[in-house]
Image (spheres, rainbow, N blue to C red):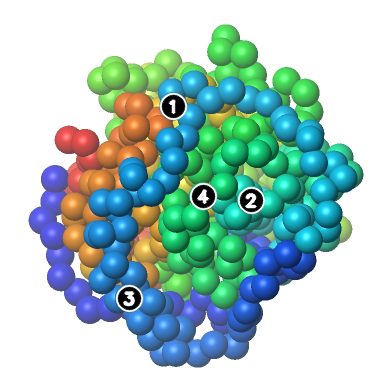
């Protein structure tokens, strides 16, 4: 356990930064039956953007407690422990004004924004169900971003009847323009039920959800912080955290086997012959901010530092990696929307290892499904809101464990390329983390 640190607020420059990784920010436009105002302007300056987030957060905070207290009464009971996975197909000829259309993901780069696209699509499905709509049409760049993962058929996801709900909790889920990343803070149990009801049956290829015997025992997802030295929102966990999970995360014992799934930049740092830039085979360079933990963990395979675990790397084929991450029994999440959304598609109940926002340090509300109270550019409201998030997560994914990283580590790693290697063999003594539950 560590002592809470105090520090001033930090500004975010999200609108001024390049976007090009799995789980990166996406701008989504919504058309048809719902009139949605506003748009995300990428030339917002830091002060106005941070001020607007602070204003919204203060308004939300005033009503948040009463909203949470009434959720159980105002939101109809959703599927419990086992959710039936099936696909409805009863509204194929619904009038166009009963179909919500979601089309555009304004994000570019070498990798698709699958995590954000999934989360916005789930928001649309949640909102459409509660509004009594008959379907959600997926097209344009949104469909392109998710077509590797999901089969959309003719583009319309038909919705089941019987889920209409007038609770104001659902109102913000209709803001899919990207203007508000603080939208759709519905309970995780409901969000997962919607994912299993409409998205899991559409997974491709067939058999994407592996049987229990062939599913990975432990999957570790690594993301690179391409906003190193500028934006604090996606500071990644230290390589030392994976040591602790490998040695003690299997019900107190060590994992025998683990597979690491890295983005393009982590793979380039680990494998000298890997080419990020396929159009320029002679370019072997990888950015200095590439996550070094894949290379580091592969070098530690079967050593005492990782409890003797045999550590391998995935083949890097996107669809296969996605299916592995959806199916794994245990998943170590990156600071990313990619795996946090993929695990919602698993009809079983994997155990998750989750990097949590540090106190007095900026965090991305969207990445925690808007279930952690706080001001984005300042940090969580208090330690209790982080604990409540983990309590809720553990109701959906029993046995999951959170790791709240020390503010001092986050500050240094934010500024340092390959900061994940800080205090590599002395991390607990120098920084430590708060494990939830203890």
Is label 2 in a helix, a strand or a loop? loop
Residue 76 sits above or below residue 413 on the image = above
In x, y percent, where is residue 355?
36, 47
Residue at the disc numbered 2 = 132
Q: Residues within 10 Å of mark 4 (few under 14, many from 20)?
A: some
N-terminal label among 1 and 3: 3
- Disc number placed over residue 165 in the picture, else none: 4
In x, y percent, where is residue 13?
48, 79
The quadrant in which the C terminus is found is: top left
Residue 411 occupies which quadrant of the picture? bottom left
Residue at the disc numbered 1 = 80
Q: Residues within 10 Å of mark 3 (few under 14, many from 20)?
A: few
Q: Residue at left 76%, top 43%?
A: 157
Q: Residues within 10 Å of mark 1 (few under 14, many from 20)?
A: few
Rounded to the nearest angstrom, the CA distance separating label 2 from label 3 is 28 Å
In front here: 335 or 100?
100
Q: Which dot, 3 or 4, sits closer to the camera?
A: 4
Do the CB atoms of the residues marked 4 and 1 lie less than 8 Å apart? no
In x, y percent, where is residue 201?
70, 29
Rounded to the nearest angstrom, the CA distance separating label 4 from label 1 is 18 Å
Is label 4 in a helix, a strand or a loop? loop
């Amino acid at each position: 356990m560590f002592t809470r640190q105090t520090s001033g607020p930090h500004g975010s420059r999200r609108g001024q930064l390049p976007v090009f990784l799995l789980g990166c920010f996406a701008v989504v436009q919504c058309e048809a039956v719902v009139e949605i105002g506003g748009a995300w302007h990428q030339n917002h300056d830091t002060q106005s953007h941070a001020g607007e987030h602070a204003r919204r957060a203060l308004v939300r905070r005033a009503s948040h407690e009463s909203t949470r207290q009434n959720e159980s009464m105002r939101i109809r009971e959703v599927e419990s422990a086992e959710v039936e996975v099936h696909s409805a197909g009863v509204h194929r000829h619904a009038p166009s004004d009963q179909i919500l259309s979601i089309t555009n993901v304004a994000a570019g780069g070498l990798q698709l924004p699958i995590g954000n696209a999934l989360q916005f699509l789930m928001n649309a499905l949640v909102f459409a169900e509660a509004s009594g709509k008959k379907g959600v049409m997926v097209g344009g760049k949104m469909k392109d971003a998710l077509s590797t993962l999901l089969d959309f058929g003719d583009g319309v996801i038909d919705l089941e009847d019987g889920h209409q709900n007038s609770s104001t909790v659902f109102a913000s889920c209709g803001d899919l323009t990207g203007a508000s990343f603080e939208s759709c803070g519905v309970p995780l149990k409901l969000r997962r039920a919607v994912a299993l009801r409409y998205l899991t049956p559409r997974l491709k290829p067939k058999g994407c959800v592996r049987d229990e015997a062939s599913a990975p025992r432990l999957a570790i997802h690594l993301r690179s912080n391409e906003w190193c030295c500028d934006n604090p929102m996606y500071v990644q966990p230290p390589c030392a955290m994976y040591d602790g999970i490998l040695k003690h995360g299997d019900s107190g014992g060590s994992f025998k086997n683990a597979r690491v799934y890295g983005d393009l930049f982590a793979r380039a740092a680990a494998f000298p012959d890997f080419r990020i830039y396929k159009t320029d085979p002679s370019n072997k360079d990888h950015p200095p901010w590439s996550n070094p933990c894949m290379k580091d963990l592969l070098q530690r395979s079967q050593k005492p530092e990782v409890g003797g675990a045999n550590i391998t790397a995935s083949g890097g084929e996107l669809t296969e990696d996605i299916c592995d991450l959806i199916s794994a029994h245990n998943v170590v999440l990156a600071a990313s929307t990619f795996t946090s959304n993929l695990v919602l598609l698993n009809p079983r109940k994997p155990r998750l290892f989750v990097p949590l926002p540090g106190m007095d340090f900026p965090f991305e509300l969207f990445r925690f499904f808007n279930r952690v109270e706080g001001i984005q550019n300042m940090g969580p409201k208090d330690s209790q809101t982080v604990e409540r998030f983990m309590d809720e997560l553990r109701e959906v994914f029993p046995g999951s464990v959170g790791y709240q990283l020390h503010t001092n580590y986050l500050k240094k790693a934010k500024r340092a390329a390959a900061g994940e290697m800080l205090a590599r063999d002395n991390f607990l003594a120098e920084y430590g983390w708060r494990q939830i539950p203890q």
